[in-house]
Structure formats: C-alpha cells, structure tokens
Amino acid sequence: MDVFDRLKAAAPDAWASYVEHDFVRRMGEGSLPEEAFRTYLVQDYLFLIQFARAYALAVYKGRSLADMRAAQAGLSAILDVEMGLHVRLCARWGLSPDDLEAATEETGTVAYTRFVLDAGAAGDLLDLHVALAPCVIGYAEIGRRLAEEIGPGLATHPYREWIGEYAGEAYQELATSARRHLGDLAARAMTESRFPDLARLFAQASRLEADFWQMALDPRGPR
Ligand SMILES: Cc1ncc(C[n+]2csc(CCO)c2C)c(N)n1
C-alpha cells in the first residue's frame, strides 16, 4: 500500500463523495446538463490559474533540485499545455477567451484553491503535495473509470473530450508519476506521527473537490 492508498483508506467517505459525485455519474451517463458543464469549465479555468500558483509554491518549497525540477515540470505542464487544452475545450463549448477572462471566481473555487495554497504556505512540500493529490490523481481515477464504463460508445459521447483527456495515456502517466513522487516525498519527510494531520488535509481537499462539482450543479442566486 503506497501513501496515496493509505490516505484514501483513511478518508473513504470524503473520497467517495468526490470520485462518485453526481456530476461525475451524470457526465458518464451523458445526462449532465450542458449548462452545468459550461459552469464547470469556466470555474476550472480560474482553478487552473490558481493551481499554477500552487506548483510555483512547490518550486519555492522544494529543498532539493530534484523536487524543484519536479514542481517546475508541473508548473510548465499547466501553463504550456493544460491551459491551452482547456481554452480549446471551452471554445468547443461556446466559451471564448473573453468569456473566461471576464468570469468571476465562485466561492467554491476560492475555497478549494486557497485551501491548497495555504496548506503549502503554512506547511512543507509534503503538506502541499498531499493537498494537491486528490486533484491530480483523482482525475486520472475518474477518467479511467468513466472510459471503461462507456467503452466504445466514447467516440460519440457528449463529454468524450474531457473523459478522453483524463483517461488518455499522457494524463494517466502524469498521475502515476505524481503518485510516485508523493510516495518518495513521504518516505523522506513523513514520520508516522504526521499521518493523521496529512489524512485530514487529504480528506478536506477531497471534500472541496466534491464541492467543486456541486457548485456546477447548483444554480447561483442573484448577488
Ligand atoms: C477541479 C479540478 N480538479 C482537478 C483537475 C485536474 N488537474 C488539476 S491540475 C492539473 C494539471 C496537472 O498538471 C489537472 C489536470 C482539474 N482540472 N480541476
């Protein structure tokens, strides 16, 4: 059992609330309302910008060149690859770069991203990577499961690009290497007495991921 499996096993309800969320189920069934998916895409754009900052923080928190380079690779992946893919996916869904730039960050986006940034700012690199783990590794689990469930029907599925992206080999490899890096970091920096605090951090990040899905399902009231 690696440290990621231990963290999941310590927070089964929080993990299930995230990876088995209604948004995920309905995306898989193809019954997710398009408007909910658009809301998600816009907030995810704002989310990815803050996540780039979290990887930049991981560069700063690194104590070895290897850790700093690993964080730099994560930062480049977001800035040079992920953002471009995301903007293209948004365009496919009728959202222009101007729409994305003009969007307001919702409370759920602020809560999740600033929680991760604070975990990293107040803690060390291991705290930061534990807070990042549900996001990076969870999406690989969700993407793979949905692709397996849908099977050959994926080619014509309404959410095929999103599912294909996260189920695809490149993202699966990225998640596998993030998982290995987390294991290495824990082997170096984790004393057993730290585990309960790390498990709490992991559970909270997983709940915030679940809230992120929920935010897209719940219409926002006027304000
Ligand atoms: C709410 C939310 N959670 C997780 C991801 C997945 N993800 C997070 S950071 C990143 C880039 C890793 O290099 C990816 C793919 C997302 N997009 N949105």
Image (cartoon, rainbow, N blue to C red):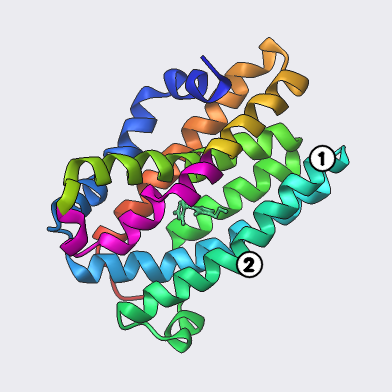
Residue ranking furthest to the right: 64
In this rendering, position of residue 52 left or right of residue 69: left
The C terminus sits in image quarter: bottom left
The residue carrying pointer 1 sits among few (fewer than 14), some (14 to 19) or many (20 or more) residues within 10 Å by Cα, namely few
Which label was assigned to residue 66? Answer: 1
Q: Please say whether residue 166 is one of the residues in the magenta stretch.
A: yes
Secondary structure at numbered mark 1: helix
Place of residue 184 in the rendered image (x, y in percent of width and height, measured from the top left): 70, 26
Residue to which mark 2 is pinned: 79
For the residue pair 83 and 34, the one nearer the viewer reads as: 83
Which label was assigned to residue 155? Answer: none
Place of residue 111 in the rendered image (x, y in percent of width and height, measured from the top left): 51, 53
Determine the residue positioned at 46% across, 69% down: 86
Place of residue 35 in the rendered image (x, y in percent of width and height, measured from the top left): 23, 71
Can residue 105 be seen in the rendering of this structure?
no
Q: Please say whether residue 22 is one of the residues in the magenta stretch.
A: no
Q: CA distance from mark 1 to mark 2?
A: 20 Å
Determine the residue positioned at 37% across, 81% down: 91
Considering the whole magenta stretch, tell me its main secondary structure. helix
In this rendering, position of residue 76 left or right of residue 32: right
Q: Which residues are magenta?
A: 153-175
Residue ranking furthest to the top: 192
N-terminal of the pair, mark 1 or mark 2, is 1
Q: How many marks?
A: 2
Secondary structure at numbered mark 2: helix
Determine the residue positioned at 68% across, 61% down: 76
